[in-house]
Image (cartoon, rainbow, N blue to C red):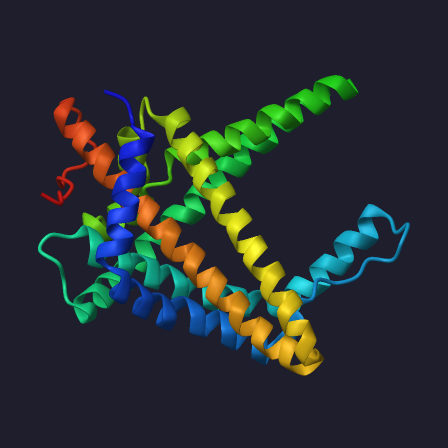
């Protein structure tokens, strides 16, 4: 059996509708408040550096490096808080029996270190593969081959990211604490389903981004009628709320994908981990 997009969407909706209050509370604490605080306390974060017209690539990179050297620690702090929130939300909606909110937060706090180590290893591996492909392509000295190599490198990065996309739910729902095992379990669980998974992720991302853009454009046009100060202040709140909603949706998507691939893995007799996924039924 193959991964079914319709089933994944139904499971995603069910997770969202059955846990609306909990997810709203958790996302408010771990996503909305950190992002709103970052945008209010450090407005520099919301403003990418302006690169002079006609500037060289080196000058543009210097401007970006100077920008990130000032705000990297804030991005890192918010990312850690958000990831803990995602892990806690996954535990709340995916574990059986349901943990309490306090237990879910403790699960998220415990899982954050192995999950982040797994992400770092994943990033290193993906970047190594991309650079290897680009190095081989550039060694030919042919611009068409280099262009094709860039396309191949990008495709491989997307493929590898899809195969490792279950790191968070495995860490939270199954309680995995070994970073290497998190990656290998995700790789095994997604085997044979990568293209369908990628299609589901792309469809969900495009739909969510379009809705978010339309919403922010409409609210931005309305807020512009009330003056610059109100528009900027309320705009920050709306931006943080939109980000929180998108992360809640993506978290529910991961939980739904994990649930279905767990079923398929067990029905197919393939063991993706030493700890069996917890079912909803």
263 vs 123, left or right, is left
Return the residue nearer the eye: 218 or 69.
218
Identify which residue is drawn at 13% across, 58% down. 98
Quarter of image, res 16: bottom left
Residue 59 as seen in the image, left or right of residue 175: right
Can you tell which quarter of the image residue 62 is in? bottom right
- Residue closest to the eye, 165 or 231: 231
Classify residue 55 as left or right of residue 99: right
Q: Is residue 141 visible?
A: no
For the point 60% across and 61% down, the residue is 218
- Looking at the picture, how far across and down is residue 229, in whole percent? 67, 82
Query: Which residue occupies the foreground of this view, 107 or 237?
Result: 237
Q: Position of residue 46 (x, y in %)?
A: 64, 67
- Asked where in the image residue 26 lies, by quadrant, the reply is bottom left
The image shows residue 163 at horizontal and vertical percentages of 38, 33
Answer above or below: position of 9 versus 82: above
Q: Quadrant of the N terminus?
A: top left
**Residue found at the far right of this picture:** 54
Which residue lies at the image location 71% right of the left edge and 23% below the top edge?
146
Task: Give the residue drawn at x 17%, y 67%.
Answer: 103
- Split into 4 quadrants, where in the image is the C terminus? top left
């Amino acid at each position: 059996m193959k991964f079914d997009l319709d089933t994944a969407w139904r499971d995603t909706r069910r997770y969202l509708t059955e846990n609306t209050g909990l997810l709203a509370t958790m996302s408010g604490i771990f996503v909305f408040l950190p992002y709103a605080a970052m945008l209010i306390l450090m407005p520099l974060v919301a403003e990418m550096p302006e690169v002079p017209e006609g500037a060289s690539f080196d000058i543009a990179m210097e401007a970006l490096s100077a920008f990130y050297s000032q705000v990297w620690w804030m991005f890192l702090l918010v990312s850690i808080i958000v990831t803990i929130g995602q892990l806690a939300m996954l535990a709340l909606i995916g574990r059986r029996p349901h943990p309490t909110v306090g237990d879910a937060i403790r699960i998220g706090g415990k899982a954050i270190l192995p999950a982040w180590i797994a992400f770092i290893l994943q990033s290193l591996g993906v970047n190594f593969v991309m650079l290897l492909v680009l190095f081989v392509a550039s060694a030919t000295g042919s611009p068409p081959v280099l262009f094709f190599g860039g396309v191949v490198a990008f495709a491989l990065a997307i493929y590898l990211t899809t195969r490792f996309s279950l790191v968070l739910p495995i860490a939270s729902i199954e309680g995995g604490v070994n970073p290497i095992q998190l990656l290998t379990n995700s790789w095994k669980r997604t085997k044979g389903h990568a293209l369908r998974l990628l299609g589901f992720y792309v469809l969900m991302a495009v739909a969510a981004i379009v809705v978010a853009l339309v919403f922010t454009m409409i609210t931005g046009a309305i807020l512009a009628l009330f003056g610059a100060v109100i528009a900027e202040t309320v705009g920050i709140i709306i931006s943080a709320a939109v980000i929180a909603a998108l992360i809640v949706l993506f978290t529910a998507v991961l939980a739904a994908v994990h649930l279905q691939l767990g079923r398929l893995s067990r029905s197919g007799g393939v063991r993706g981990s030493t700890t069996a996924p917890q079912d909803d039924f």
